[in-house]
Amino acid sequence: MASPIIWWNAHNNWVSFVFQGARATTNGEKFKLHFDWFFRSILGQSLYLLPWIWFPTIRQLYISFKLRKQLLVYSFIFWMAILPIVFFTIVTLWSDLQYHFHWQAPGYMMLFIPLGFGVDRCLNSAPKQARLTRRWLNFSIVFTVLTIGVLATHMVTGFWTAYGPKWLVHKFHGDTVDPTIQGVDYTDIMTRFQKDGWLDDPHIFAGAPRWWLTGKVDWALKGKKDIIVFDPDPRNLAYLVDPKTLIGKDAIVIGDKHQPFIDMNVKPFFDGVTQLPDIQVMRNGPEYTLQVYYCKNFHKPVEPRMDLPLYRQLIGLPPFGK
């Protein structure tokens, strides 16, 4: 089942393995232990899983360890769980994985099996223990449904912006941006492309100065336009389109307060770049602003830009590697 991954990487400088493997390194910096990153990872895992579920799963990890030599099923669960949990947590001692607390998730998912067995056993044991277990289950269900319900409703409607305490958003994300707007599809991009006739113009492609923004633009346009990333880190998007097929065409580049990167990484590829009126992302009214740039005549830059995979592709080299 994994053979296509191996085959593709063998023909593309093993770029997937190099990229993911580099995340477990110090990225060229001097080796140093960061216990703050380590404890941040443990805290983040417990919050992602919810503390009242995380602690019972860790207890099941301990139980699986104790019983691993008595029952084969516990041995299987222990080794399948301990490897991803410990490996991706230990790595944080020297590598800043930031907020990727979900990397340990496959290990925790294995622990749901003995946890379910333990819950069933508690529900059928002494009345007091069964009562406490039911309360724990009921609390978990109610908390999850209410929290996800409120967050999902706000993400879709933006009701909190008008009716909720704004200090909560401001405390964690400044005075102007509600981070939940990032969960909304930027459908207003498609509206703008249709209105200005860009969607049906074969002489125009799309782009963005960041890989994550490129993905959101591509999703908004339903994959109907060729799209490229003007950045040293285009991720997998570098393989979507052969940029040599776009030479001579114009581009609509969408930015998200990326003016310095437009100047540095976009303008060298075009004869001219003109900023057009912004796109307002609508939810509970206009809540987010994207910048729009019309770029004329895509070509290879005059000055070499070997730091950009896009440039490497234009001169016939693979986007990554030597």
Image (cartoon, grey):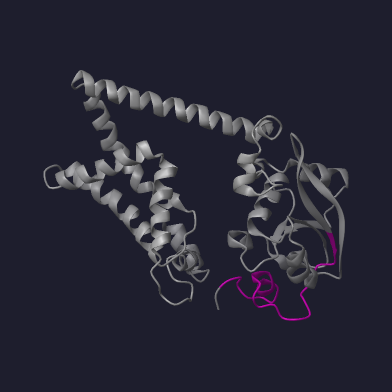
Query: From this viewpoint, which residue is outermost toward the left?
Result: 70
Q: Is residue 130 above or below residue 216?
A: above
Q: Position of residue 29 (x, y in %)?
A: 47, 76
Please report the bounds of the magenta region as a residue range: 294-320
Mark yes or no: residue 139 visible: yes
Q: Residue at x 34, y 23 (%)?
A: 135
Query: From this viewpoint, which residue is outermost toward the bottom?
Result: 303
Q: Position of residue 92 (x, y in %)?
A: 40, 61
Q: Position of residue 195 (x, y in %)?
A: 87, 43
Q: Residue at x 20, y 42 (%)?
A: 63
Q: Is residue 307 above or below residue 273?
A: below
Image quadrant where one finds the C terminus = bottom right
Residue 51 covered by magenta stretch = no
Q: Residue at x 83, y 63 (%)?
A: 249
Residue closest to the eye, 6 or 54? 54
Judge left or right: residue 23 versus residue 82: right
| Image quadrant assignment for residue 37 | bottom left
Instruction: Give the prevailing secondary structure in the magenta stretch.
Output: loop
